[in-house]
Image (spheres, grey):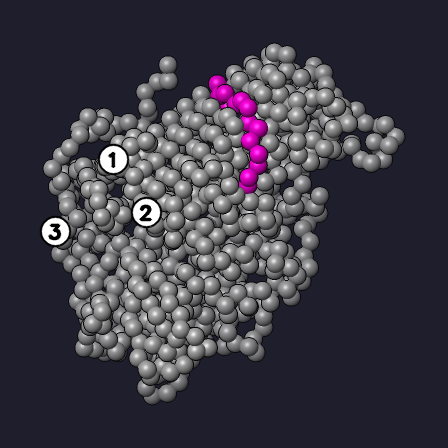
Amino acid sequence: MFGENPFLSPAQTWLRTLTSLSTLVAAGVILAPLFAEEATTQAPAIVNIDAGDGFQERLQGRLITAAPGEVIILPVGRFKLDKELNVAASSVTIRGQGPDQTILQFAGQRTGSHGLLATGDNLVLEDFAIEDAAGTALKTLGCRNVIFRRLRAEWTGGEKPTNGAYGLYPVQCDNVLIEACTAIGASDAGIYVGQSRQVVVRRCRAERNVAGIEIENTIDADVYENVATNNTAGLLVFDLPGLPQRNGKRVRVFNNQVTKNNHVNFAPQGNLVATLPPGTGMMVMATDDVELFQNEISANKTCNLAVLSYETAGTRHSDANFDPTPERISIHDNRFSSGGDQPQGILAQQLASFFSDQFPDILYDGVRPPNYDEKKQGPLIYLENNGEATFADIQIGQLTPQNLLSGKYQIIRNTDAYQKPIAALSEVKLTPHAPAQGTVSAAVAVYRSAPKRLSEWGLFVGDGSSQQPVDGVIPYDLNTPLFSDYASKYRFIRLPKAASIDWRDDDVLDFPVGTVIAKTFAYPTDMRDLDAGQTLLETRIQIRKETGWYGFAYIWNDEQNEAMLSLGGGEINASWIHTNGARRTNQYRVPNANECLNCHRNDREFTPLGPTARNLNREFAYPHGGENQLSHWSARGWLSNAPPEARRPRLADFQDPTGDIDRRARAYLEVNCAHCHNPTGTASTSGLDLRSAQTDPFQYGVWKPPVAAGQGAGDRKYDIVPGHPEASILMRRLESSQSAIQMPPIAHEIVHDEGVRIIRQWIEQHPTVEPTDHGKN
């Protein structure tokens, strides 16, 4: 009836019949020669992750070094995890023993805002459950060819605003199959497909979420044979403004059961979904070319089906390229019954006098695009063969106080004018993929061959405890550094012999192949007396190979005479005296290699974050005296094509009390946030651009509603409200140390008081900016 799975290759079918296999690649793999450029090959393998102590570390380590074609088998059991899992490898299968047999339990999660975050291609994720994640249970970001099969995402403590936002969340993905999955208890959406293309969601169940299934800003999706019940709203197809992929289209929704979605709305109040009235069955908002057919839609107490403009939702926006009006919505051959008998929400209150006893099964707000000629172009929605379904086009634009008082309005209830056929949409046909097998990716080859000891890199004099670089290793500093829980940092660059860095005005400088960038993190014993000693924590290494940049961390031992490679990251119990004389203790987090990839990932490539020309344009205390770093590098032949000093851009020092508050705040946001919040970063899905070069207030957050913020939004509705930091989501996230709220989301446990103070002052002083006329309500 449902056909064969288009993604399942013969090799995968064969692998599914196997229950065990001698492990060919153990945790301690045989390393290739140091950073061999040639990719190595190995036979396809099934890798069994053992249960017991250290499960999370073993699993995360394997996710970092997995080879294409590997099937990572999770055992039976309930495994308590406290850190986000990250998958950057491609052509990998992660398989449990069933969603009620293999359970990844994240209650009490301390770091990361996801249960599992995947960024590779050709992924199969099947037969396990994720429970009680701090934020999204399972997110795939920017992936091509992804299967979610027989997964369960659930929050087990009841329906609360503090639950994670999303159960299963593919975003900016292509060629996605979600089948036979279950989502329960999400404070936003159980299954949420965002800004994606070529998607099939089938035979899933969404229950006790705020929204059961959402298809947002997505092009070409088939949603069928699903059950959405006992959610606040059952199944939504909609578009939001201000996102990289703005206007979704061509979505078919058919053969679904959308019944009894009357659950109380428990979303955090700042999220758009918090405005959804309980009792909403289906909703189409702003998206064009949607076909709804052969669905059972019943017993949804506010409305079985609503077709609305984004403007009717009542949220500000100033995205001139966003189309807020749904067009070419085809609704046919559905079965409606017993809905609309207890309408709730603001719209229900506004329309109560028109529908005194019961809302219609199909409610259309009747918003037309400007200058739309319905007589010539036909209706925007098409209705046919929906049984005894009731209908109302309320033509909301005419419901002005003046018209209401004078009685000059008309609600259209007859469907005759809406029966001009709209062409049926085509079936979404997913492209089969057979994950490549045997060839180790360049990244995995680098990770597997990385030196085990920091000393093998030969960067420092002696055992490295003094952080004195050897000849040829260049120390440097930045105008505004990334905040890392008040840790001190020592930064170094080693260039290949006779090579130089090429100038770039805006991006990270163009370092030659073979460059090594090292950064050591340390806590002074007493920040009031830097001669009193320090504790070295970790040294992060970035190396540029022919195939790109790669990064990983080395953790210093208790003796402070060596640091050991830790691809899986780690934690260090730290104690130190702050500048105010108070002793502070914290658990310093060392990110795993995949977390490094996520922060450093721009346009699917790993890049350094700090060494841009504008952030390096400052004086450095060299042994011979103070000198501008860039001038010094140019004079030594380390930097090529630099413009004269007067024409070099300079990023502000956010701590400079004499500096302009706008430049200082924008510098802080660029360094601490914009590595993800930019048009090609991992947070591009939010549409928030925090680069200092971004001059459009809406794009850097002013009056911008949140996207996929979950608990991060709280009760706040906009990223930045000029003059009101207490109402701005940006402040809420910077002031929090909770994993589901804080920003940045990883390697960060302490609130940065000085940074918070600058951003608060900046928002307080920000000029009043109103949305453009396009976005005003």
Q: Nearer the viewer, mark 1 or mark 3?
A: 1
Disc 2 from disc 1: Cα separation: 15 Å
Q: Tell which circle, 3 or 2, labels the residue nearer the N-terminal end.
A: 3
Q: Tell which circle, 2 or 1, labels the residue nearer the N-terminal end.
A: 1
Q: How many neighbours does mark 3 have within 10 angstroms: few (below 14), some (14-19), or many (20 or more)?
A: few
Report the residue at 40% width, 42% height from top. 132
Percent across and percent down for residue 111 are 38, 53
- Check if residue 553 falls in the magenta segment: no
The kind of secondary structure the magenta stretch mainly shows is loop
Q: How many neighbours does mark 2 have within 10 angstroms: few (below 14), some (14-19), or many (20 or more)?
A: some
Q: Which amino acid does label 1 sit on?
A: Val
User: Which structural element holds mark 3?
Assistant: loop
Q: Which amino acid does label 3 sit on?
A: Ile
Res 507 visible: yes
The magenta segment? 252-267
Report the residue at 55% width, 77% height from top. 657
Image mark for residue 81: 2
Disc 1 from disc 3: Cα separation: 28 Å
Quadrant of the rendering where the N terminus is positioned:
top left
Report the residue at 12% width, 51% height from top. 30
Specify the farthest residue to the front. 157
Report the residue at 84% width, 32% height from top. 403
As drawn, 742 above or below 100: below
Determine which residue is flagged by label 3.
Answer: 30
User: Which structural element holds mark 2?
Assistant: loop
Q: Tell which circle, 1 or 3, labels the residue nearer the N-terminal end.
A: 3
Number of dots carrying numbers: 3
Res 282 visible: no
User: Which structural element holds mark 1?
Assistant: loop
Percent across and percent down for residue 439 are 19, 42
- Check if residue 258 falls in the magenta segment: yes
